[in-house]
Amino acid sequence: MRLFAAVLPPAWAVAELGLAVRELTALPGADGLRWTGREGWHLTLAFLGEVDEALLDELRERLRRAAHRTDPFALRLHGGGRFDGRALWAGVAGGLDELRLLAERADAAARRSGVPMDQHRRYVPHLTLARSRTPMDLRPYVTELAAFEGGPWQVTELALIRSSLPRDGIPGERPRYEAVARWPLGAGG
């Protein structure tokens, strides 16, 4: 099963960002982007890819321990950026050190469980809003996002998400995400 570890923003934070994204979709060229759906908005901590079923019990236990060792922390959606003219994203502010630590712990949990983590990159906290199949100038969108300041919330759990890619070839079809496990952060969890 295709999995990743993530932090899920609360519904009201998603709604706040949704208002800003609605403005972005009215900009010239926005129809050339594949916009992600609100129901799938998340902050990926560690992408695990295809995980063998035999590794799931140990993976779940190690992710539970990673959550237990990480205290809750505050975040807010803030501003935005782009990757190589192919991805537009919303940024985050607040407890970035804690978020990075949780991402490192999720990555280590996967590695120690036997999940091959070949695509290790420097962690850049972000929430993907749109993608382009070909490079395009995303600077106008980033400029519009610069003023976005979402309200703060407490990150209180780590989630393990199953990603089901579209298989039907239907234009506009999006991946589906399902939380298969959640663990509370902190020693109380």
Image (tube, rainbow, N blue to C red):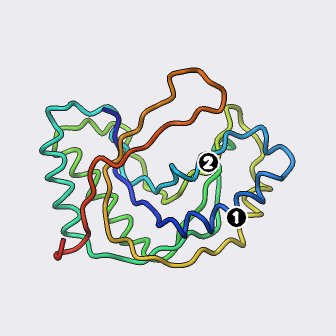
Between marks 2 and 1, how big is the CA–CA gap?
22 Å
The three-letter amino acid code for the residue at tag 1 is Leu
Q: Nearer the viewer, residue 17 or 99?
A: 17
Q: Nearer the viewer, residue 176 or 123?
A: 176
| The quadrant where residue 35 appears | top right
Label 2–label 1 contact, CB within 8 A: no
Name which residue lies at 14% across and 32% down.
Answer: 54
Name which residue lies at 29% across and 51% down.
Answer: 107
- Label 2: which secondary element: strand
Judge the density around disc 2: few (<14), some (14-19), many (≥20) Cα neighbours within 10 Å: few
- Of the two numbered discs 2 and 1 in the rendering, the one whose residue sits closer to the viewer: 1
Q: Is residue 94 above or below residue 84?
A: below
| The quadrant where residue 151 appears | bottom right
Q: Nearer the viewer, residue 179 or 49?
A: 179
Q: Nearer the viewer, residue 122 or 99?
A: 99
Which residue is disc 2 drawn over? 83
Left or right side of 82 for 11: left
Name which residue lies at 23% across and 64% down.
Answer: 67
Which residue is disc 1 drawn over? 19
